[in-house]
Image (spheres, helix red, strand yellow):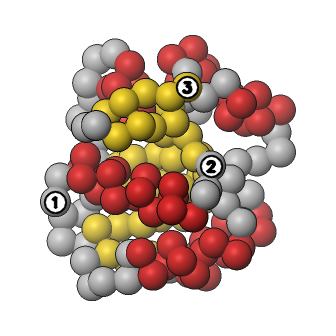
Amino acid sequence: MSQSELLRKVIQALNKEGIQYMITGSFASSMQGEPRLTHDIDLVVALKKKSVDNLVKAFSSEEYYFDKQSAINAINEQDMFNLIRVNEGDKVDFWLLTDEPFDQSRFERRISDEFMSLKLQVSSPEDTILAKLKW
């Protein structure tokens, strides 16, 4: 499975659960400009505890590492957790949407884009740059 196919699977799982998200980080900047070699996908998610069990089920095979307690802790602490495709090492970093004004405003400004015939919610190019500068 390629990184793009992993992204497709994750987005389909998020859409199925009605979880709002935004692709950000290197994957977003590669979509919006110069491609960068990256082995992770960064997503900002508005995840609630009630959806965690269904996400765990969506990635329950031995192919994935997805720790339920890490997801719950991230929700409680407005932090992050990972999904890892074990054999390939590809990783999805789920960053919880925080109450910080910048996070809230950039999440509101996310844009729709299409990649591999899949409609995606992506950080605006300006916010991708601002987030990289903030890091």
Give the foreground label among 3 and 1: 3
Measure the alpha-carbon separation of dots 2 and 3: 12 Å
Label located before the other in sequence (2 or 1): 1
Amino acid on which disc 3 is placed: Ile
* Between 94 and 14, the one nearer to me in the picture: 14
* Between 33 and 14, the one nearer to me in the picture: 14
Q: Quadrant of the N terminus?
A: bottom left
Residue drawn at the location 83% of the way across and 32% of the way down: 101
Name above or below for residue 32 compared with residue 40. above
Amino acid on which disc 2 is placed: Gln
Q: Which of the 4 image quarters holds residue 30?
A: top left
Label 1: which residue? 1
Q: Which secondary structure, mark 2? A: loop
Label 3: which residue? 111
**Residue 58 is at least partly visible in this image:** yes
Measure the alpha-carbon separation of dots 2 and 1: 24 Å
Q: Are marks 2 and 3 in contact (CB under 8 Å)?
A: no
Name above or below for residue 9 compared with residue 123. below
Residue drawn at the location 77% of the way across and 68% of the way down: 76
Task: Locate residue 96, reporting x and y percent.
Answer: 66, 54
**In the drawing, what numbered circle is on residue 20?**
2
Residue 1 relative to residue 121: left or right: left
Measure the alpha-carbon separation of dots 3 and 1: 26 Å
Label located before the other in sequence (2 or 3): 2
Task: Locate residue 71, reporting x and y percent.
Answer: 60, 71
Q: Which of the 4 image quarters holds residue 78?
A: bottom right
Q: Which secondary structure, mark 3? A: strand
Near mark 3 (Cα within 10 A), the count class, few <14, some 14-19 or many ≥20, is some
* Between 90 and 115, the one nearer to me in the picture: 115
Amino acid on which disc 1 is placed: Met
Residue drawn at the location 76% of the way across and 28% of the way down: 105
Q: Are marks 2 and 1 in contact (CB under 8 Å)?
A: no
